[in-house]
Image (spheres, rainbow, N blue to C red):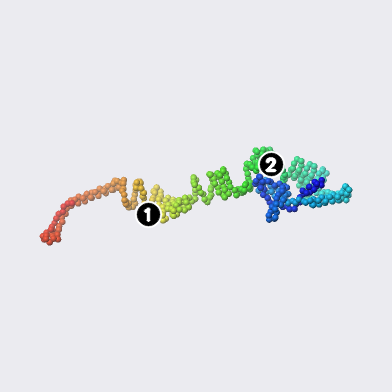
Amino acid sequence: MLKATRKALLEQEVVSLEATISTADLFKIDRTEPKPHLGDDVMCIDPDMGMNRLKARITELTEYPYSMDKHAEPTISNLNLRDYDDIISDLERNKNITNNLFSNGKIRTDVFESFAKQAVIDINNSKTELIYPPEGGILAQEKTNPLEQVRFTSKGLGISTDGWKTIRAAITAGGVVAEQVIGQLGNFVSMLIGSGEDIVQINMNGISAGASSFNNAPFRLNMKGDLIGNSLTANYANIEYSNFKNGAIVGSSINVGNGMFTVTSGGIMSAVGANFSGSITASTITGTNINGGTITGALIRTAAIGRRVEQDASGFRTYDSNNRNRIRINTDSDDGIAAISLYGSGGAFAGEINSYQNSGQLTIFSNDLWLGSNNTGNPIRLQGAVSFGGTATFRSGFIYGIGISDVSGLISEISSLNDKIDTLRASFNNHRHSVTTAHHNHGNLANQQNTGGGTFTTTTP
């Protein structure tokens, strides 16, 4: 017996330091990590405190097994083994206490009377809260509120707050009845709430609800952490470092269909295709093709600067490489929307094509209008009646396809000219006249005087 006592005392430990620490439950993230338990030995290391591999033990442990965002709160104590001298001292002290109680193998009378007197005092003191009813058992009654009572009988333990009219909680051989259980529960093989198929149960399979069979339950959570449920409504949830709160997903990415639809943690969304029934609001839309639908009130352009085409609420415009507007259709008036205005490389107005009138007339005008063809084999064709409001100048080339009869009045004018020409020709051909000259020697003094002159008649041409 002495050896056993010494061994028990040798194994007894004395607390010299106790602390409650904040921890991180690694086993909730990685199932391969060990789970701490009450009484486990731990090693404390803190260089700032000079604590190097100080041995301690978990003496208290508050756990949150059903909350992934809350971690265990352990209280650790460093425990020192008692040395041999301390054990011998405790044995001597206990031996002296025993010797004082006994005399020749019998309890001393003064000691017994002292114990008996103290027992009577303790029993009398307990009567202020303990009552021994005639029907049996023990009734504990609160001093300040007599209606709060605890009764202990051979059948069990009951608690009441209304003078035993009703029972708030009870423990009997049939089980435990309580409105609520606060604190950490122990180990259970199975726990059931409800009956039939309307049941919630916790057993070795996991947690299930809505069916008596775990595999058929619409909600079930197995021991590996796999959760299946019909729907989920949560004010806040953490899913692998992703926060779902107030309808927003923070600090995460989305990948659906193996990259078919993704959203990065930076808010960049990518999708193979999309159907939107509402509106899309964006500062910039970049893409290859936009098919169908209506675009209203936006600036559409082929480039930001340089040669480009632009279209917006004010009209349609083209620009050259110097950012000068060359072609314009304005929407500021009915005339502006009915005309294509053209501008030169210097920005000056060059002309326009318009349809101002309601007669179906199309007008092309300019201060200097040039119609030309780069290929003489593909001439410019004017079909229909052509009216020239000014002078027409033909600088070179030929005019084909116009007959004399196609020009109004030309035949009669030519006939009149022919008649006049014929008259002039006949007059010319039949013309004779006389010429009179004075006498002259043609500058030769040898010629006769007063000769060489006279009147002469000409011949016809």
Residue on which disc 1 sits: 367
Q: How many marks?
A: 2
Return the residue found at the far bottom: 445
Q: Residue at x 36, y 49 (%)?
A: 374
Whole-Å distance between the Cαs marked 2 and 1? 95 Å
Which amino acid does the dot numbered 1 rest on?
A: Asn
Q: Residue at x 68, y 51 (%)?
A: 22
Name the one closer to the observer, 148 or 28.
28
- Mark 2 surroundings: few (<14), some (14-19) or many (≥20) residues within 10 A: some
- Mark 1 surroundings: few (<14), some (14-19) or many (≥20) residues within 10 A: few
User: Between disc 2 and disc 1, whose residue precedes?
Assistant: 2
Residue on which disc 2 sits: 202
Q: x, y (%) of residue 459?
A: 16, 52
Which amino acid does the dot numbered 2 rest on?
A: Ile
Whether residue 299 is visible here, answered yes or no, is: yes
Check the image and report above or below for 332 versus 191: below
Q: x, y (%) of residue 170?
A: 76, 43
